[in-house]
C-alpha cells in the first residue's frame, strides 16, 4: 500500500469513526453526483494489479445503485441532470452513472445490473478503441512490467533503471515510470511504453481487442433504452498537452463517428484522464465549440447549482476499486471528503 493510499484510507476511517460525513452532509451535499466507473467485472487473483483502481465488481455496482437510492438519489440520464442543473428546481438529488472508455465488461457485467435495477447510465466511448487504433497505454505499461524483470528506459534525457522482479518491485516500477511519463509530452509517453512493450513481447492491439467494445457492440448498446453513448475522443489524449487544432479534431471527429454509428445525437463528452493537467479551460471551450452540451472531468466533487454556468467542466465522484465499500460511498456522497480535498471550493473550472 503506498503512502498516499494509506493516507486516503486512514482519512476515510477517521471520517467514518467520527461520523463527520453525517454531521457535515447538510452543508456539503450537492444537488447531485456524477459517479465515474471504468471496468465492471469479477475480481481476478492477480497480485500485481496497478490499474485496480479502475475496476469494481458487479456486486459493488449493484450495492452502489441500492445505496444511492436508499440515500435519496434519483438516478437519471445525463440529459436530465443537465436539465435539473439549469432549472434549479429543488427536489431530491440526482445521480448519473458514467462508464469511461467503452469496455466489453460494461456490456457483459454492468448492463445486466443496470437492467435489473432500471438504472440509466452513460458510456463514454473512445472511437479509436472501437477502431482498434488507439492505445490502452496504462494497461500496456502494466503488461510490459509484468513480463520484465528490469525496466530500463530513457525519459526526457534521463536514464531510468528499476528492478522489477517481485510484486513490490513491479508496483514501484509502474508507479515511478507512469509518474515520470505523465509529466512529459504525450508522444514521449506513448513511444517509451511502446519500446517497453516491444522488449516484453506485449502487443497493444491485442489488449484493445480483448478489453474494448467493437463497433457492432457499441451500435447495439446505443439502442438500449437505459444507455446514453457519450464521446471520449478518438485517441484518448491528454487534451491540454496538445495544440488547439488537434483537440478540436479529436472532439469533433469522435462526435461525428459516434453519431454515424449509433444514429443518435452525441451531446456529452468525458475528457480523457480528465485531471487539470489533461483538460483545462481551453479544452472546455473547444468542447462547447465542437457542439457538446456537457463535459465531465475527473476533478473530484459533487454537483452544485453553480455548475449550471459551467456544464463543460463538471466534477465527478470517482469510485476507486481499492475502496469498494458502502461506507466509502456514503462519505463521498456526503461531500465532506471533497470539501477537504478542494479546500471548501465547490466550483473548480480553472
Ligand atoms: Zn478514459
Image (spheres, helix red, strand yellow):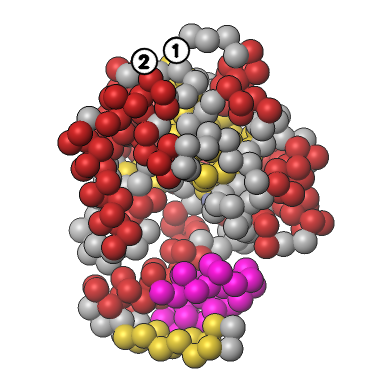
Q: Which residue is mark 1?
A: 92
Q: Residue at x 59, y 72 (%)?
A: 184
Q: Main secondary structure of the magenta part?
A: helix
Q: Point out residue 22 in the picture as x, y percentages from the top left corner.
A: 28, 25
Q: Which residues are magenta?
A: 176-205
Residue 146 magenta: no
Q: Identify which residue, 249 or 95, lies in the foreground.
A: 95
The numbered disc on residue 72 is 2
Q: CA distance from mark 1 to mark 2?
A: 6 Å
Q: Point out residue 63 in the picture as x, y percentages from the top left corner.
A: 27, 29
Q: Residue at x 54, y 79 (%)?
A: 192
Q: Point out residue 349 in the picture as x, y percentages from the top left corner.
A: 63, 41
Screen quadrant of the N terminus = bottom left
Residue 203 magenta: yes
Q: Residue at x 30, y 17 (%)?
A: 70
On screen, residue 118 above or below 206: above
Q: Would you say 88 lies left or right of 336 here?
A: right
On screen, residue 68 above or below 148: above
Q: Are marks 1 and 2 in contact (CB under 8 Å)?
A: yes
Q: Point out residue 312 in the picture as x, y percentages from the top left corner.
A: 67, 36
- Chain-order first, disc 1 or disc 2: 2
For disc 1, the neighbor class at 10 Å (few under 14, some 14 to 19, many from 20) is few
Amino acid at each position: 500500500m503506498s503512502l498516499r493510499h494509506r493516507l486516503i484510507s486512514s482519512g476515510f476511517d477517521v471520517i467514518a469513526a467520527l461520523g463527520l460525513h453525517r454531521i457535515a452532509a447538510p452543508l456539503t451535499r450537492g444537488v447531485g453526483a456524477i459517479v465515474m466507473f471504468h471496468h465492471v467485472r469479477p475480481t481476478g487473483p492477480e497480485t500485481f494489479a496497478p490499474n485496480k483502481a479502475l475496476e469494481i465488481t458487479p456486486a459493488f455496482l449493484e450495492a452502489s445503485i441500492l445505496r444511492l437510492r436508499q440515500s435519496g438519489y434519483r438516478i437519471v440520464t445525463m440529459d436530465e441532470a443537465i436539465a435539473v442543473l439549469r432549472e434549479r428546481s429543488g427536489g431530491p438529488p440526482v445521480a448519473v452513472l458514467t462508464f469511461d472508455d467503452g469496455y466489453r465488461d460494461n456490456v457483459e457485467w454492468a448492463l445486466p445490473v443496470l437492467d435489473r435495477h432500471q438504472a440509466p447510465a452513460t458510456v463514454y466511448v473512445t472511437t479509436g478503441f472501437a477502431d482498434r487504433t488507439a492505445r490502452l497505454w496504462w494497461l500496456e505499461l502494466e503488461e510490459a512490467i509484468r513480463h520484465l524483470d528490469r525496466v530500463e528506459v530513457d525519459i526526457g534525457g534521463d536514464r531510468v533503471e528499476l528492478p522489477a522482479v517481485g510484486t513490490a518491485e513491479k508496483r514501484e516500477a509502474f508507479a515511478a515510470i507512469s509518474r515520470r511519463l505523465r509529466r512529459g509530452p504525450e508522444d514521449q509517453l506513448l513511444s517509451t511504453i511502446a519500446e517497453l512493450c516491444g522488449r516484453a513481447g506485449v502487443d497493444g492491439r491485442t489488449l484493445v481487442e480483448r478489453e474494448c467494445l467493437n463497433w457492432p457492440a457499441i451500435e447495439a448498446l446505443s439502442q438500449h433504452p437505459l444507455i446514453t453513448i457519450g464521446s471520449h475522443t478518438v485517441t484518448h489524449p491528454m487534451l491540454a498537452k496538445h495544440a488547439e487544432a488537434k483537440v478540436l479534431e479529436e472532439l469533433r471527429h469522435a462526435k461525428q463517428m459516434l453519431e454515424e454509428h449509433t444514429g443518435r445525437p452525441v451531446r456529452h463528452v468525458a475528457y480523457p484522464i480528465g485531471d487539470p493537467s489533461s483538460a483545462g479551460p481551453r479544452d472546455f471551450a473547444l468542447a462547447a465549440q465542437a457542439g457538446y452540451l456537457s463535459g465531465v472531468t475527473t476533478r473530484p466533487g459533487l454537483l452544485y447549482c453553480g455548475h449550471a454556468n459551467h456544464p463543460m467542466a463538471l466534477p465527478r465522484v470517482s469510485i476507486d476499486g481499492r475502496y469498494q465499500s458502502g461506507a466509502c460511498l456514503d462519505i463521498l456522497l456526503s461531500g465532506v471528503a471533497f470539501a477537504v480535498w478542494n479546500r471548501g471550493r465547490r466550483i473548480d473550472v480553472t
